[in-house]
Amino acid sequence: MSRQEKLAALASTGVTKAELDLLDGVTSTTAELNLIDGGTARGTTAIADGDGVLINDAGTMRMTSVETMATYMATKVGIETTTGDVGTYAMLGEQQNDRTARSTGEDVAASNGLYYAGLTIENSKVNFSSSPSGTWRLMGAYSSNSGKNDKPVSLWLRIS
């Protein structure tokens, strides 16, 4: 097709020079442009250092790194948490007198004998430190078959 034939075909589409000027310099493929379409399906691609994120910066679209996003989220949004906050995990022990068996997913008030598990062991017993507050969900089960001086320790999630 000659240049004149291409121009004639283009003219018949109703595309204006101003519209063509908008595309001048675009180096994206159709697939790349479609990624920013709001109806595009989300994938499960893992995010890793060095990846970029498209951000609307006060009306100007810009790329930023995931490292910059992580710093922003930690300092401005408040993702960082304190030990014992709702949503945090802890290794907790339970000072049970009745050796109650507990199941994964069971919720227990900290006032019912939960303690942060200490890292010291004396005479084959785990030493407990301070007691947390709130309600905790057991993430791993333990049995009631522990010995007389044994205190079960497991992973717990603070839920309230």
Image (cartoon, rainbow, N blue to C red):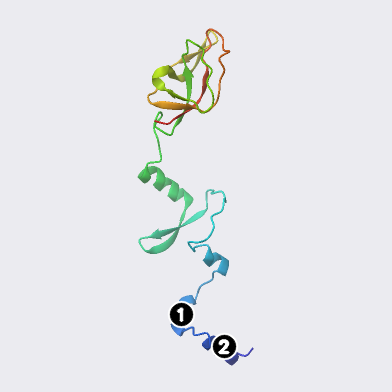
- Nearer the observer, 74 or 144: 144
Figure disc tally: 2
Say above or below: 135 vs 113.
below
76 relative position to 91: left or right: left
Which quadrant is the C terminus positioned in? top left
Q: Which amino acid does label 2 sit on?
A: Ala
**Marker disc for residue 10:** none
Spatial CA span between label 2 and label 1: 16 Å
**Marker disc for residue 9:** 2
Residue 131 visible in this rendered orientation of the protein = no
Q: Where is residue 53 drawn, in percent x and y?
A: 48, 55
Q: Where is residue 126 drawn, in percent x and y?
A: 51, 14
Which quadrant is the N terminus positioned in? bottom right
Say above or below: 102 vs 125.
below
- Nearer the observer, 38 or 60: 38
Q: Write the residue at 53% across / 55% down.
A: 42
Picture quadrant where residue 116 is located:
top left
Q: Where is residue 45 drawn, in percent x and y?
A: 57, 51
**Marks 1 and 2: in contact by CB < 8 Å?**
no
Q: Write the residue at 53% across / 88% down.
A: 12
Mark 2 and mark 1 lie on one chain; the one further toward the N terminus is: 2
Q: Write the residue at 42% across / 31% down.
A: 159
Q: Mark 1 points at which residue?
A: 19
The kind of secondary structure element at disc 2 is helix
Q: Where is residue 83 drawn, in percent x and y?
A: 41, 29
Residue 56 visible in this rendered orientation of the protein = yes
Q: What residue type is labelled 1?
A: Glu
